[in-house]
Image (cartoon, grey):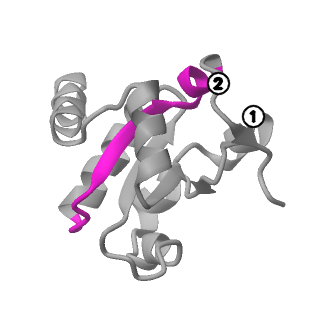
């Protein structure tokens, strides 16, 4: 895939999956039933931890073997849940969010990057071993 195609794909993902500010994300988390998904690779999550109450589903797993059970195992079959996706800086999360929308999920938002969340002192926790 050449650079132009990658940029086009990323632009399409960014257009499709709204990116939230820290304040918007906090408001949604505190007022809405949410599933927060960290799509960074396991080594990244182990080094920094997760946003509080997030689940780790690496983008590499979603890309290679997407199955609705990856998401539904964490939603208690709640179709009205809002899915918030994040990565390190917001690029992979936009791409995963776009894939989730294309697979039928309606309420998908890009939380952006863990680094931004941490810079605002957003709550985090270590990964569960």
Answer with mark 1 or mark 2, whichever residue precedes in sequence. Answer: 1
Taking depth in this image into account, of 16 and 59 the one nearest to the observer is: 16
Measured as percent of width and height from the top left, residue 82 is found at: 36, 57
Q: Position of residue 118 (x, y in %)?
A: 64, 24
Residue at numbered disc 1: 48
The reply to whether the magenta stretch includes residue 76 is no
For residue 106: magenta? Answer: yes
Q: Nearer the viewer, residue 26 or 73?
A: 26
For the residues bearing labels 1 and 2, Cβ distance under 8 angstroms: yes
**Left or right of residue 126: residue 114:** left
Q: Which mark is residue 118?
A: 2
Q: Which residues are magenta?
A: 103-118
Q: Is residue 118 above or below residue 39?
A: above
The residue located at (32%, 44%) in the rendering is 109
Regarding residue 115, the answer to whether it shows in the image is: yes
Considering the image in quadrants, where does the N terminus appear? top left
**Residue mark closest to the camera, 1 vs 2:** 2
The percent coordinates of residue 45 (x first, y second) are 70, 42
Image location (x, y in percent) of residue 15: 15, 34
Q: Is residue 81 above or below residue 59?
A: below
Residue 63 quadrant? bottom left
């Amino acid at each position: 895939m050449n650079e132009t195609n990658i940029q086009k794909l990323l632009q399409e993902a960014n257009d499709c999956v709204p990116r939230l500010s820290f304040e918007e994300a906090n408001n949604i988390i505190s007022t809405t039933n949410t599933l927060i998904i960290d799509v960074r690779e396991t080594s990244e999550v182990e080094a920094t931890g997760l946003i509080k109450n997030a689940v780790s589903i690496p983008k590499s797993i979603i890309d290679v073997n997407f199955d609705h059970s990856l998401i539904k195992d964490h939603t208690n079959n709640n179709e009205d849940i809002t899915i918030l996706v994040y990565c390190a800086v917001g690029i992979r999360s936009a791409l995963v969010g776009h894939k989730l929308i294309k697979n039928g999920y309606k309420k998908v938002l890009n939380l952006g990057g863990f680094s931004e969340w941490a810079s605002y002192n957003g709550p985090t926790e270590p990964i569960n071993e």
